[in-house]
Image (cartoon, rainbow, N blue to C red):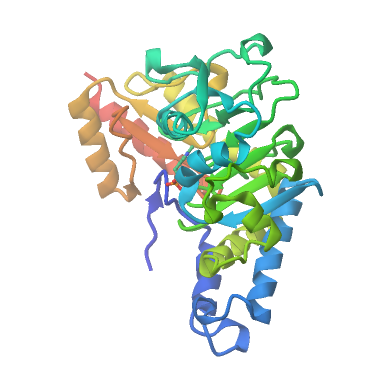
Amino acid sequence: MSRCYNFSAGPANLPLSVLEQAQRDLVDFRGTGMSVMEMSHRGKNYTEIHQNAQENLRTLMNIPENYRILFVQGGASSQFAAVPLNLFTERKKADYVNTGAWSKKAIAEASRYGAVNVVASSEDTTFNYIPKLPATIFSPDADYVHITSNNTIYGTCYPGLPEVGNTPLVCDMSSDILSKPYEVSKFAVIYAGAQKNIGPAGLTIVIVREDMIGRALDITPTMFNYRTYADNNSLFNTPPCFIIYMAGLVFQWMLDNGGLEAMAARNRDKASLLYQYLDQSELFTATVSGDDRSIMNIPFVTGNVDLDKKFITEAENNNFKTLKGHRSVGGMRASIYNAFPREGVEQLVQFMEDFEHRNLP
Ligand SMILES: *Cc1c(COP(=O)(O)O)cnc(C)c1O
């Protein structure tokens, strides 16, 4: 068996022990004679998987009692519509912060259902920072404020949460959920596609405060209504059973490895290893500076498109895979989610040092 260092932004690498556990369970889940993929979602075995995954996520994130955990499908992209459909109930007005391609998609989708006020944007400089958000820029009568906590493509992350008063705060946390502790009670809705820090693609987690449930617009499709999931324990229809099982294994792996404080310490350490190298390198530069730097996605460039290409090719040949940056930013991007090993970052830095020596003019 040979495993590479996989810097994919998503679907991203999973803990090896989780993959191996899934492999052991694959054809015969704990003596049942069937795979998790083959069993009824109403049966005793799956029910236990479903409940454990929820409970472990609640423990990990310290989710208060008055929040519900929903297992939905359709990706974070479906939540771009589900959020306004469920929350545009008072004035059909919402404030959005535009910090990148995902925010823009969320804005476009919400604009179909109500008035979207873009209160701040960092588009002027290819989204390489998080705009300052003084409390006064938010509308006092918005139904909610929407932010994207970590911007996967550009490598920015909120250094702190904006002060939005009593307005419900909604967060697309797809690429930094579970990377560090967040105080869930500061949010009305948190949503995240699974394929970055949670498990394989195909599951979307929604964590919603109870008072946000049951107010959806009449036109809301049943499968987009938070109440459908809350009233049926996310079993109104067939859930993505196998993905929930995989997410459950990842949650257990996080609990066994010290929970989110420990994840955060390891993630900061891994990220600072790479940033420290980038900050003193004469060849490579990080595209984001200061407090807004993500510890999950780290874009960098040489400033020379041909040299970037050469670097990516050589990296691939040396087992460092998927380092190509998003097409809108160019250059390189190292996504180093929870499951990415420190050793992989150490080896990447060594490889970059060597590449730098060989390629400095
Ligand atoms: C990946 C990503 C998305 C899109 O998620 P899908 O599950 O593919 O719809 C949305 N927002 C952010 C911040 C992401 O990183």
Q: How many marks?
A: 0
Res. 262 in view: yes
Could you say where residue 93 lies in the image, as x and y percent from the top left? 58, 24
Could you say where residue 111 lies in the image, as x and y percent from the top left? 46, 29
50 w.r.t. 58: above or below: below
169 w.r.t. 5: above or below: above
| In the displayed structure image, the side of residue 279 where residue 148 appears, left or right | right
Looking at the rendering, in which quadrant would you find the C terminus? top left
Could you say where residue 215 lies in the image, as x and y percent from the top left? 67, 42
| In the displayed structure image, the side of residue 292 where residue 66 appears, left or right | right
Residue furthest right in the image: 65
Res. 257 in view: no
Residue positioned 70% across, 41% down in the render = 212
Looking at the rendering, in which quadrant would you find the N terminus? bottom left
Residue positioned 56% across, 28% down in the render = 147
Q: Give the quarter of the image for residue 33.
A: bottom right
The one nearer the camera, 308 or 254, is 254
| In the displayed structure image, the side of residue 261 where residue 177 appears, left or right | left
Q: Give the quarter of the image for residue 96.
A: top right
Residue positioned 33% across, 45% down in the render = 322
Residue furthest left in the image: 306
| Ligand 1 located in image quadrant | top left
241 w.r.t. 251: above or below: below
Q: Give the quarter of the image for residue 100.
A: top left
Could you say where residue 12 lies in the image, as x and y percent from the top left? 44, 51
Residue positioned 45% across, 56% down in the render = 201
